[in-house]
Image: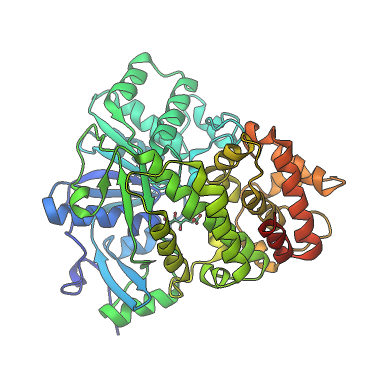
């Protein structure tokens, strides 16, 4: 019988970085696989290099799928690094307490207010920032945001918990940093804005507003590591490699990157000694990552789903997908930003090729395709507007939009590949209601692009809507390859 993993049974030599001391210095919201393979690993390594009381108090948002097994094994878990040369496993031991935020929101608020904590890190996904797609501001009419704003309510949204925690922390006045580790452009600025909007709508005192504006920092950051979902196979692999049974291992690629602004009002772990980069060029790094990697990832995912490819490596092995993605990088993404100093686009793209090709990762196209209504907002509209304002049509970005619509809100009479049904799309019902009764494909697309699902500035670009409609027509009539071929010859 394999021994269960726990603090007492960490196999010799397998610990990644250092175990955290019992004191916690970081609160983390969004205890999922990405954080466990990214920020947690940098923190373990930073403590090995320079010590510090940086144990993590972690909260999953609403599910105990990970928290349950983590608690049963003293919050210790393994990372399974999957490379083209095979798998390697190591153990992470930095979480000192874990829980589910919506089960005990007061615990989250109190943890943020506790002066012993100096940073809150967030991986709550793009959806967790509860923003209005049309304006980019906090969605005050979102039912959960509205409920959180009611006097004396217990917050349920991540922004609500964060804001209420900062409101309470204002009493101690202790400096603090809120570090978004999600795939957002200007991640720190966006987080500051939604927190500020929440606090103003909640009518908090001027003292609270001034505490947040002067003593709380919101550094911008770019995060990167491909981390798929865990399966039973990962538990089996860890048992083979480490001889212990881990009920919540994290599979991940070996590549990892973190670039941050060095603006931590209450101090920080020595993440720089753990491989993170501190830079003043964050916006450029975010654009590289969100456009070249994430934007392309969405295109691979939706083209893959429509052509029946269950994983990114299988989708990427199809020539029409590679051509569309590489064309999109060259024509629609690279011209839209000034990259960071020393950035080598060719090397970056060839590294992406190797990462997407990795067959051991098994990254589901439906996982990348999930939450498209919020993810695409970070990956597509600003780049599209760059071209549209110069009189050019960004054909590949239109293709990505058309492929997403074909998957999650198909026009009547079109049945996408059954994989599309596995995409978790929070806006599915609202999209269906918006397109109900549309008479033409153009009308169908207009009701989405102009229906509050995309920024107002993009909705105003009729030429974009028309191109999306043409490509959606091709997808539904002649198939996704025909649409990609049309883009290639545009
Ligand atoms: C992916 C990202 O699921 C997705 O939308 O594009 O999770 C991607 O794998 C990471 O951002 C890589 O750093």
Height in image: 281 above or below 202? below
The single residue placed furthest to the left in the displayed view is 50
Answer yes or no: is residue 331 visible: yes
Q: Please, which residue is most extreme toward the right here?
A: 439
Tell me what residue is drawn at x 21 percent, y 54 percent: 274
User: Is 233 displayed left or right of 5 in the figure?
Assistant: right
Judge whether 291 appears above or below 68 on screen: above
Q: Residue at left 29%, top 80%? A: 241
Q: Is residue 200 left or right of residue 92?
A: right
- On the image, the x and y values in percent for residue 50 come to 12, 50
Find residue 459 and report its horizontal and vertical position in percent.
68, 35
Q: Where does the image place residue 174, in percent across and percent down from the top left?
A: 22, 28
- Residue drawn where x is 26% and y is 32% of the image: 176
Name the side, left or right, on which 427 lies relative to 268. right
Color theme of the render: rainbow
Report the number of discs. 0
Quadrant housing the N terminus: bottom left
Give above or below for 59 relative to 202: below
Residue 109, position as x, y percentages in the image: 35, 36
Q: Nearer the viewer, residue 185 or 266?
A: 185
Q: Quadrant of the C terminus?
A: bottom right
One can see residue 410 in this view = no
386 shown above or below 86: above
């Amino acid at each position: 019988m394999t021994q269960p993993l726990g603090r007492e049974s960490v196999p010799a030599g397998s610990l990644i970085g250092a175990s955290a001391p019992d004191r916690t210095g970081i609160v983390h919201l969004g205890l999922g696989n990405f954080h466990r393979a990214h920020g947690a690993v940098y923190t373990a390594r930073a403590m090995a290099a320079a010590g510090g009381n940086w144990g993590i108090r972690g909260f999953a948002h609403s599910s105990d799928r990970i928290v349950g097994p983590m608690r049963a094994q003293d919050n210790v878990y393994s990372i399974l690094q999957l490379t083209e040369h095979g798998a390697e496993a190591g153990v992470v031991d930095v979480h000192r307490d874990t829980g589910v935020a919506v089960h005990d929101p007061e615990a989250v608020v109190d943890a943020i207010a506790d002066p012993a904590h100096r940073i809150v890190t967030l991986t709550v996904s793009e959806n967790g920032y509860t923003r209005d797609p049309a304006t980019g501001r906090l969605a005050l009419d979102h039912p959960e945001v509205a409920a959180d704003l009611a006097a004396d309510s217990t917050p349920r949204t991540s922004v609500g918990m964060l804001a209420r925690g900062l409101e309470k922390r204002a009493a101690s006045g202790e400096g603090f940093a809120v570090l978004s580790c999600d795939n957002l452009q200007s991640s720190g600025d966006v987080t500051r804005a939604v927190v500020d909007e929440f606090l103003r709508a909640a009518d908090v005192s001027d003292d609270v507003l001034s505490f947040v504006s002067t003593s709380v920092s919101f550094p911008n950051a770019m995060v990167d590591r491909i981390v798929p979902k865990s399966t039973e196979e990962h538990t089996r692999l860890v048992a083979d490699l480490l001889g212990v049974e881990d009920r919540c291992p994290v599979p991940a690629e070996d590549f990892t990157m973190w670039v941050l602004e060095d603006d931590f009002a209450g101090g920080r772990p020595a993440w720089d000694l753990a491989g993170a980069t501190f830079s003043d060029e964050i916006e450029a790094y975010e654009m590289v990552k969100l456009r070249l990697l994430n934007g392309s990832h969405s295109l691979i995912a939706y083209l893959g789903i429509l052509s029946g490819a269950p994983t990114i490596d299988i989708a990427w092995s199809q020539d029409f997908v590679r051509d569309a993605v590489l064309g999109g990088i060259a024509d629609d993404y690279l011209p839209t930003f000034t990259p960071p100093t020393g950035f080598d686009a060719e090397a970056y793209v060839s590294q992406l090729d190797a990462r997407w090709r990795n067959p051991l990762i098994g990254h589901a196209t439906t996982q990348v395709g999930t939450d498209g209504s919020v993810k695409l907002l970070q990956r597509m509209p600003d780049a599209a507007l760059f071209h549209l304002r110069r009189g050019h049509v960004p054909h590949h970005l239109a293709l990505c939009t058309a492929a997403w619509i074909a998957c999650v809100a198909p026009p009547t009479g079109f049945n996408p590949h059954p994989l599309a049904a596995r995409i978790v799309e929070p806006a599915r019902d609202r999209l269906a209601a918006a397109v109900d009764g549309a008479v033409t494909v153009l009308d169908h697309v207009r009701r989405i692009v102009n229906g509050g699902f995309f920024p107002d500035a993009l909705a105003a670009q009729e030429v974009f809507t028309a191109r999306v409609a043409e490509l959606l027509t091709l997808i539904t009539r002649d198939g996704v390859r025909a649409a990609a071929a049309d883009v290639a010859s545009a």
